[in-house]
Structure formats: structure tokens, C-alpha cells
Image: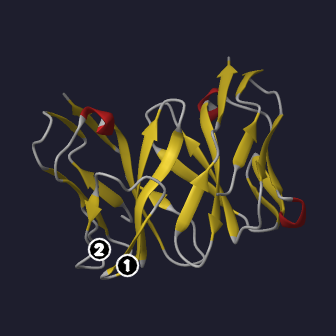
């Protein structure tokens, strides 16, 4: 089954404790992205990648890191999480000229 | 940056009614997509539509890129259509997407 898989789905953690949200797709898509969704602010792009070792900042990259060492994986790293990064996060993937496929989301709560 | 505005922000329908959702954007775009976020939070792609009209069952979409807007039509609405509908525009040479604020739809039985 074609899918984008994010883990964990839910996480409660504390300020400053490094965390990684994993994202994996099995569709051989070149493009992958991370978004955050906040009430009243909608969906905003954090980082995106157009292929292995090619990443670029989206609209809200501050406080996040990404890497794309393999085509199927695109982890999101929060080196020193802060409460303002409490949000619902989505990973997505697609091929050029094709629609976006989203994972089911990761709800992060940073205390 | 590009502005993407959706209207109406909220919509309540009786089951069986038709509706039109609108997406306006402020600059030229490479492409436009419509998504449905269901009550469980899942985001499902409905249409990938740079221009013209597409139909999928009771849903159809039209994009007029020269006039910078897109419309999503829902006919004979069902309770399962409830949720939030987003449009997103693709700009530049890469994978940058900007989302509109969404239209929250509630279909009552």
C-alpha cells in the first residue's frame, strides 16, 4: 500500500530535550516536505527536499533541522524544542507534477 | 510572499445541498491542489489542477490561472464531506507550497 508513515503519532516532552520525528515513504517520490498546522495559522511549510541531499527552507524553518540521506526518509529534528513548537506536524511526499500525499500527522506537545 | 485566501471560512449545509468553495491567490503559480482534512485530521488530496476543470464523483474543481482563482464544487453533499477544505498553490522551481486558511464545512443530516 502506498503511504507516508510518520512516527511517533503523539509525543509529550520537555523543553530542551532533542527529538526526531521520522518520515518514510514507499512511493519512490523525489519531493518530500514537512508542515506544521496551528489553529488560526493554517498549514505552513517548514522544510522541503527535492531529492537526496537537496533540502531547502520553507516559510517557518527556525528551530528545525532536516536531512535527506536516503530517498525514502526525511526526518525532522528539533535540537532544543521549545513550547512554541507545540503543534500538529505533517510529512508529505510527491513526484514532480503529481499530487501531494500526506502522512497521518504527529501531535507534539512541548512543556 | 504569495497570499492565498479561501472563502467562505465556515459553511453549514443540509445533507443533499450543493456548495461552491473559492480560492484566490495573489500571484502566478505553477500549480494548485485541493485537499480535504477529515474530522480525524487526515489530509486527502482531492485535485491537482493547474488549469481547467476536473471532476471526481460529486466533486469538481475549476482553476482559472489567468484570473488567479480556483473553485471547488460539492454536489449532493453528505455528512462524510464534513471537515476542512484547503487549497494550496505551488510556486517557484522547487517544492514550495502555500496553503490557504481553509473552509470549514459541516454537513448536517
| Marks 2,1: beta carbons within 8 A | yes
Q: Residue furthest right?
A: B67
Relative to A37, say whether A91 is above or below. below
Residue A19 x/y as whole percent: 15, 49
Quadrant occupied by the C terminus of chain A: top left
Callout 2: chain: A
Q: Residue at x 79, y 34 (%)?
A: B76
- Badge 2 element: loop
Residue A37 x/y as whole percent: 45, 41
Relative to B28, say whether A13 is above or below. above
Q: Quadrant of residue B78?
A: top right
Relative to B60, say whether A56 is above or below. below
Q: Residues within 10 Å of mark 2 (few under 14, many from 20)?
A: many
Residue A5 x/y as whole percent: 29, 57
Name the side, left or right, on which A5 lies relative to B108. left
Work out whether residue B65 can be spotted. yes
Name the side, left or right, on which A74 lies relative to B9. left
In this view, the residue in front, B96 or B31, is B96
Q: Which mark is residue A72?
A: 2
Instruction: Please name the residue that numbered disc 1 is placed on.
Output: A28
Q: Residue at x 64, y 68 (%)?
A: B91
What separation in Å lies between label 2 and label 1 (alpha carbons)?
7 Å
Work out whether residue A104 can be spotted. no
Q: Quadrant of residue B33?
A: bottom right
Q: Quadrant of residue A49?
A: bottom left
Callout 1: chain: A
Colour scheme: secondary structure
In this view, the residue in front, B55 or B34, is B34
Amino acid at each position: 500500500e502506498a503511504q507516508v508513515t510518520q512516527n511517533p503519532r503523539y509525543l509529550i516532552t520537555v523543553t530542551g530535550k532533542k527529538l526526531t520525528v521520522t518520515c518514510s515513504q514507499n512511493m519512490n517520490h523525489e519531493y518530500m516536505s514537512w508542515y506544521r498546522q496551528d489553529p488560526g495559522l493554517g498549514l505552513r511549510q517548514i522544510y522541503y527536499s527535492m531529492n537526496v541531499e537537496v533540502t531547502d527552507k520553507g516559510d517557518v524553518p527556525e528551530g528545525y533541522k532536516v536531512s535527506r540521506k536516503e530517498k525514502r526518509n526525511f526526518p525532522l529534528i528539533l535540537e532544543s524544542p521549545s513550547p512554541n513548537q507545540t503543534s500538529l506536524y505533517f510529512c508529505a511526499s510527491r513526484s514532480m507534477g503529481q499530487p501531494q500525499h500526506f502522512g497521518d500527522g504527529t501531535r507534539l506537545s512541548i512543556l | 510572499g504569495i497570499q492565498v485566501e479561501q472563502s467562505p471560512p465556515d459553511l453549514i449545509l443540509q445533507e443533499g445541498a450543493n456548495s461552491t468553495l473559492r480560492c484566490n491567490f495573489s500571484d502566478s503559480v505553477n500549480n494548485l491542489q485541493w485537499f480535504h482534512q477529515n474530522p480525524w485530521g487526515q489530509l486527502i488530496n482531492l485535485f491537482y489542477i493547474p488549469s481547467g476543470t476536473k471532476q471526481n464523483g460529486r466533486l469538481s474543481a475549476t482553476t482559472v490561472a489567468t484570473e488567479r482563482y480556483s473553485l471547488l464544487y460539492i454536489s449532493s453533499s453528505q455528512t462524510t464531506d464534513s471537515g476542512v477544505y484547503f487549497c494550496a498553490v505551488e510556486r517557484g522551481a522547487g517544492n514550495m507550497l502555500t496553503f490557504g486558511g481553509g473552509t470549514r464545512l459541516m454537513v448536517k443530516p
